[in-house]
Image (cartoon, coloured by chain):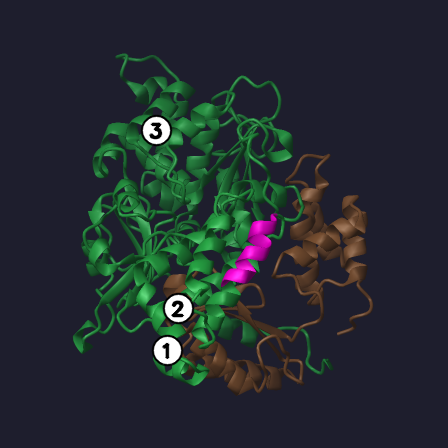
């Protein structure tokens, strides 16, 4: 992945247009969160250069875009691993092994929360309430897939499966 | 970081991930609801428009928009309903806001200045981040059209032509599902494709769009949500002015919770009186409780308001490990911001706004966090205090500084470094946050502290009286 060239693809630009169309013509800024999400989906994180592109697209000051990137927890301000794993440890999850799941992954991946494995495969993060409390332990993967009832055994299966899928694509 | 992996996620990996995704079987399709309205007959695959219509969906919208000659003055099926009649029906039904405050929905709708000549907005608050709550996710994932229909009815009642549903960023798959449902509703003509498109042969038009957050608890606060919808940091606004006069883009705006909107179609179809009779006076209808923590079967349970807590606990399979001697210690009855209640008080409560308020807590979002007799309340409070520190938006000094102070004190008590004066200081800091901030996050951080100390003071004192971290550790394990 080339991190230094934040080109926005045509596909992403058409997604931008779709988001902007949801709001009044003089309120394009309302689409900023969606646009940054589209950038992150495509590039893995939101760089300063991407913020500038989004700012230009929406007619915003770059600092106003940066305020959004830094305020909302799910935007990656630096590159992260191919799989970003967010484990909820808030109280309802803490009562059902959320912290156990996080510890298990720290041990298994050999990193502490907040870190990325040296091979760039996994970033592990503790997160606040994901809104899936009945399915605890829960883990959100790449801001999209909410994995439920993640016992240590299921975590092992998932990690092994992702590693093997990666090996198969090499 | 050296990136050595291929950044493209293979179909094999995607397929694998999907196998771990929530199915709703455990959380909502367990068949242990009581007289469900929103969750009735759902199975996970019947979320599409045709399924919703087969369950009687969009009949309420058709009913209010119907035009023709009445055979009798009460024949609403033929004459439709005026906006005033819709609001009167919602008031009669005793529907109260399901997001946390429990404010009467019909009354809120009547605050909207219907004759305001400019644009007005309807907003659905689906930023479900209150720890313990996961009902709106399942409503939107498995019955999205109930929310769309409810919003269309509300828009009609208030003369609103544009609406947004702001969805918690963490449930992005549900946001995508809701977008799909919107496309279906547009194609079928239940909501407008283009600005001004009339719905079902009436003069009413309503455009509805989905929007999403991206990880900020504070955006569940309605004015922070409006700021976020405007593309800014989610920092709450001073009230007044209230959103009904100065809301999204400075225009009159009504904001309701997802479950509130989802309740409306049933209420309109069956009438306010029938809805009221499902619950109890002043607490009409059913409520979806998200039961989490130390129960056998955590999940969403839709039951009539006024159902005894003991019954709800039974539906969730009782306290986990009861056969091994585990007993109920405490319950946080309405999401993490609600004051904790000891088991003895909780077992006497019925699950409705008034009963829980009388017991000294609040029904909030209906998130019931159950704790068994092995739980350390200091440790529990420590986790909650960390959360409020993390999520304070930083705007008001008492909250920004106070939430960190609270967490540091609870943390030092938990690690055996607490001082005898800490409990009074905790209460004092909580007192000086509560009621002194722009929004309710400050109150939400303070209330759990005060309630935990009030009901479980001995646990805090026991940890403070021990001298070393090691001995404190023994107490927590």
Q: Point out which mark residue B90 bears.
A: 3
Query: What shade does chain B have?
Result: green
Q: Nearer the viewer, residue B157 or B65?
A: B157
Q: Start and end of the magenta stretch?
A: B396-406
Q: Percent position (x, y) of residue A7? A: 80, 61
Specify the quadrant of the image occupied by residue B252. Answer: top right
The residue under label 2 is: B378
Asked whether B103 falls inside the magenta stretch, the response is: no
B314 relative to B223, above or below: below
How far apart marks 2 and 1 lie (CA) works out to 9 Å
Residue under the image location 68 percent in, 58 percent down: A70
Asked whether B400 falls inside the magenta stretch, the response is: yes
A105 relative to B426, above or below: below
Nearest-to-viewer mark from 1 and 3: 1
Classify mark 3: residues with Cα within 10 Å, few (<14), some (14-19) or many (20+): many
Query: Disc 1 vs disc 3: Cβ atoms closer than 8 Å?
Result: no
Specify the quadrant of the image occupied by residue A112. Answer: bottom right
Figure disc tally: 3
* Residue A122 showing in the rendered view: yes
Q: Percent position (x, y) of residue B84? A: 40, 19
Q: Point out which mark residue B476 bears.
A: 1
Q: Nearer the viewer, residue B308 or B398?
A: B398
Tags 1 and 3 on a common chain: yes
Query: Disc 2 vs disc 1: Cβ atoms closer than 8 Å?
Result: yes
Quarter of the image containing the C terminus of chain A? bottom right
Q: Secondary structure at mark 2?
A: helix
Q: Percent position (x, y) of residue A90? A: 45, 65
Tags 2 and 3 on a common chain: yes
Quarter of the image containing the N terminus of chain A? bottom right
Specify the subunit that label 3 lies on: B
């Amino acid at each position: 992945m080339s991190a230094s060239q934040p080109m926005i693809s045509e596909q992403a630009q058409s997604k931008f247009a779709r988001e902007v169309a949801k709001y009044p013509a003089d309120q394009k800024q309302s689409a900023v969160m969606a646009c940054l999400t589209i950038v992150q989906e495509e590039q893995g994180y939101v760089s300063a250069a991407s913020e500038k592109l989004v700012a230009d697209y929406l007619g915003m000051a770059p600092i106003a875009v940066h305020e959004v990137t830094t305020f909302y927890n799910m935007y990656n301000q630096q590159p992260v691993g191919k799989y970003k794993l967010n484990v909820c440890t808030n109280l309802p999850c803490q009562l059902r092994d959320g912290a156990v799941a996080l510890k298990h992954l720290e041990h298994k991946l050999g990193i502490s929360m907040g870190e990325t494995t040296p091979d760039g495969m996994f970033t592990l993060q503790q997160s606040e309430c994901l809104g899936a409390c009945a399915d605890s332990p829960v883990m959100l993967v790449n801001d999209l897939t909410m994995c439920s009832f993640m016992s240590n055994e299921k975590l092992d299966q998932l990690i092994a499966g992702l590693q093997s899928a990666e090996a198969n694509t090499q | 970081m050296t990136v050595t992996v291929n950044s493209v996620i293979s179909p094999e990996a995607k397929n694998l991930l999907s196998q771990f995704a929530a199915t709703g079987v455990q959380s909502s399709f367990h068949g242990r609801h009581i007289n469900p309205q929103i969750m009735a007959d759902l199975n996970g695959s019947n979320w599409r428009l045709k399924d919703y219509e087969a369950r009687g969906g969009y009949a309420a919208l058709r009913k209010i928009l119907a035009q023709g000659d009445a055979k009798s003055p009460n024949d609403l099926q033929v004459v439709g309903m005026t906006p005033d009649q819709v609001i009167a029906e919602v008031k009669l039904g005793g529907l109260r806001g399901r997001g946390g405050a429990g404010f009467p929905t019909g009354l809120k709708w009547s605050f909207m200045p219907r004759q305001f000549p400019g644009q007005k907005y309807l907003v659905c608050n689906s930023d479900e981040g209150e720890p313990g709550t996961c009902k709106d996710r399942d409503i939107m994932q498995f019955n999205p059209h109930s929310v769309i229909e409810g919003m269309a009815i509300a828009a009609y009642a208030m003369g609103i032509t544009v609406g947004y549903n702001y969805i918690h960023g963490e449930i992005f798959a549900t946001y995508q599902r809701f977008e799909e449902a919107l496309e279906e509703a547009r194609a079928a003509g239940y909501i407008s494709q283009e600005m001004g498109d009339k719905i079902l042969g009436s003069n009413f038009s309503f455009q509805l769009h989905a929007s999403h957050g991206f990880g900020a608890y504070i955006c569940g606060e309605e004015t922070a949500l409006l700021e976020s919808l405007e593309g800014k940091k989610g920092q709450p606004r001073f009230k007044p002015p209230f959103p009904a006069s100065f809301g999204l883009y400075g225009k009159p705006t009504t904001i309701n919770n997802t479950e509130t909107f989802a309740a409306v179609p049933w209420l309109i179809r069956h009438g306010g009186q029938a809805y009221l009779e499902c619950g109890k006076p002043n607490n009409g209808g059913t409520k979806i409780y998200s039961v989490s923590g130390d129960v056998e079967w955590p999940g969403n349970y839709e039951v009539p308001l006024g159902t005894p807590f003991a019954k709800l606990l039974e539906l969730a399979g009782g306290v986990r490990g009861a056969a091994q001697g585990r007993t109920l210690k405490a319950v946080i009855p309405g999401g993490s911001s609600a004051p904790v209640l000891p088991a003895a008080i909780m077992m006497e409560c019925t699950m409705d706004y008034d009963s829980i308020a009388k017991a000294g807590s609040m029904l909030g979002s209906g998130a019931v966090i159950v704790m068994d007799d092995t739980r350390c309340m200091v440790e529990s409070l420590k986790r909650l205090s960390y959360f409020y520190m993390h999520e304070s938006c930083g705007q008001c000094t008492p909250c920004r500084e106070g939430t960190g102070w609270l967490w540091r004190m609870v943390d030092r008590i938990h690690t055996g470094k607490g001082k005898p004066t800490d409990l009074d200081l905790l209460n004092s800091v909580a007192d000086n946050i509560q009621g002194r901030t722009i929004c309710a996050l400050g109150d939400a951080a303070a209330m759990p502290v005060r309630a935990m100390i009030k009901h479980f003071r001995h646990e805090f004192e026991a940890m403070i009286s021990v001298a070393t971290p090691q001995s404190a550790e023994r107490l927590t394990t």
